Amino acid sequence: MSGVFFNFLQRWLVTILAVLVAAWLVPGIRYDTAVTIFLASLLLGFLNSFVRPLLLILSLPLLLVTLGLFVPVLNALLLMFVGRLVRGFQVDGFWPALWGGLVISIVSITINLLLGRGARVQVRRGTPRSPGDKGGDDGPVIDV
């Protein structure tokens, strides 16, 4: 299996599990069959990968004014959109979508951290210098 396909499959399985947990915990989110949850998770993953970044850029002024508190609203709107598009996957309104989006985010972050796919911080040290060298490298660089 190629690395790209394995990465996609792993992300999709994490999303499926997160949506299942949200459907189990949040009243107002339901699905009919396993195929429905697979399709809803696939569409949600697609929207989060391609549409959500565009929505974040377009709503940047609102995000700045609300100090980022508008992000869960965008997640809820995407989840409601998935509920409209996928027959057999129901989201009963804004509040279940908001809580469902929060649950999906928390479960996804937790699983990705357990799998070692969370944010990685790498500290690199500059090359050793002589005491009189006044180069531009002042110390460690943190890549996130």
Image: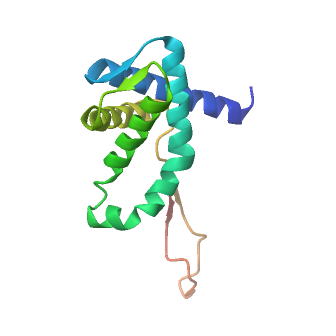
The outermost residue toward the right is 2
- Res. 97 visible in picture: yes
- Res. 144 visible in picture: no
Question: As drawn, is 106 to the left or to the right of 143?
Answer: left
Residue drawn 37% across and 30% down?
107
Q: Indicate the position of residue 124 as horizontal and vertical percent values.
A: 55, 60
Q: Indicate the position of residue 57 as horizontal and vertical percent values.
A: 47, 62
Q: Is residue 57 above or below residue 79?
A: below
Residue drawn 50% across and 26% down?
86
Number of callouts in the render?
Answer: 0
Query: Which of the 4 image quadrants contains residue 111?
Result: top left
Question: As drawn, is 6 to the left or to the right of 65?
Answer: right
Q: Indicate the position of residue 9 as horizontal and vertical percent values.
A: 61, 27
Q: Is residue 58 above or below residue 118?
A: below
Q: Nearer the viewer, residue 116 or 32?
A: 32
Q: Nearer the viewer, residue 139 or 133?
A: 139
Residue drawn 35% across and 51% down?
71
Question: As drawn, is 78 to the left or to the right of 143?
Answer: left
Q: Indicate the position of residue 136 as horizontal and vertical percent values.
A: 56, 82
Image color mode? rainbow
Q: Is residue 86 above or below residue 3?
A: above
Q: Please state, as top left, top right, bottom left or bottom right, where the N terminus lies in the image.
A: top right
Residue drawn 54% across and 64% down?
125
Q: Nearer the viewer, residue 7 or 39?
A: 39
